[in-house]
Image (spheres, grey):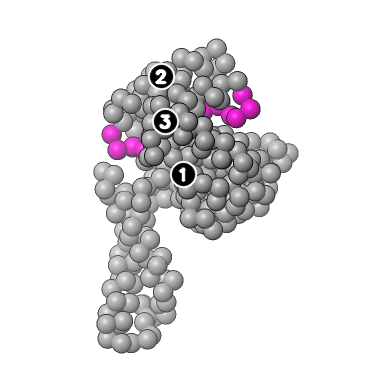
Amino acid sequence: MRPRRSVLYMPGANERALEKAKTLDVDALILDLEDSVAPDAKADGRARVCAAATSGEYGNRELTIRVNGLDTEWHADDLRAAAEAGPDAIVVPKVNSAAEVHRIEKALEAAGAPDRTKIWAMVETPIAMLRAHDIASASDRLTVLVMGTNDLAKELHAEHVPGRAPLLGGLSLALLAARATGKVILDGVYNDVRDIEGFADECTQGRQFGFDGKTLIHPGQVEPCNRVFAPSEDEVAQSRKIIEAFETATAEGRGVVTVDGRMIENLHVDNARRVLAVAEAIASRG
């Protein structure tokens, strides 16, 4: 398990941003060639992010490259160059079908991408929500779904409001697809980088919903995101307590297990083991 609490977009054509990314306490980076890079800077950005991906200077941060969309003039060159660079993953925007996943996978194989380079598919349109299970199950190489909530809101003609009520249907469909297929899923971005309280509230909502982490657009969002998506000390202690009580009861042949007055079943033990696995993955990242 790799922790993916905080996943920060960094503009691929900005040398200072790429340098700063080496110092940030993020679990993963998305070196961006799409929205943050102007058309006349696409080639320069491509060279910069591929050099970054092969530099070995980003420590234990998971390193990914977001290419331009399948329907753009830059997509094929981006995908070919990124495949040759061999980052941890290639992030593809606006994936709308299983057929598009297959097309991406074949292009990566043709370009000689190493097996360790995975596909992260951004789901950010109404049709992607309705086809989320097909997309998520299209390939073993696809390991992560990334919510594109800004584009989803635009396509829905929805407003950005606290609590994200207009988006909850789409979020739920994507989460169901991720869990049904065993994929990781990342929540979308929060646009107001000055509103740390609102951002923390949305992180809490995302964690409660079941997201594995959140995509970020500013370094100031990293600390609260890491904190919210990490198990607390109390959660870790309680999880150990549940596992110990269950294992003791099982060894003694007892069919009923209680912890602090609450009945414990297999599902509680599974949840406790997941909490500990996440905590251990975070600790091992350093």
From this view, report whether residue 52 is shown above or below residue 166: above
Give the residue drawn at x 63%, y 27%.
Answer: 71
Q: Quadrant of residue 122?
A: top right
Q: Which mark identifies residue 112?
A: 3
Q: Nearer the viewer, residue 130 or 104?
A: 104
In the rendered structure, does residue 61 fall within the stretch colored magenta?
A: yes
| Residue carrying label 2 | 48
Q: Position of residue 278 (x, y in %)?
A: 35, 54
Query: Rounded to the nearest whole Å, what is the CA distance between mark 2 and mark 3?
Result: 20 Å
Which circle, 2 or 1, is nearer the viewer?
Answer: 1
Which circle, 2 or 3, is nearer the viewer?
Answer: 3
Give the residue drawn at x 51%, y 46%.
Answer: 139
| Quadrant showing the C terminus | top left
Query: Rounded to the nearest whole Å, what is the CA distance between mark 2 and mark 1?
Result: 25 Å
In the picture, measured across the screen, residue 56 lies left or right of residue 189, that is: left
From this view, report whether residue 112 is shown above or below residue 174: above
Is label 2 in a helix, a strand or a loop?
helix
Is label 3 in a helix, a strand or a loop?
loop
Q: Position of residue 281 (x, y in %)?
A: 31, 51
Stretch of the chain drawn in magenta: 59-72
Q: Amino acid at mark 3?
A: Gly
In the picture, measured across the screen, residue 141 lies left or right of residue 2, that is: right
Q: Position of residue 247 (x, y in %)?
A: 29, 76
| Residue carrying label 1 | 141
Q: Quadrant of residue 75?
A: top right
Q: Is residue 275 in sight in this rendering?
A: yes
Q: Position of residue 214 (x, y in %)?
A: 48, 43
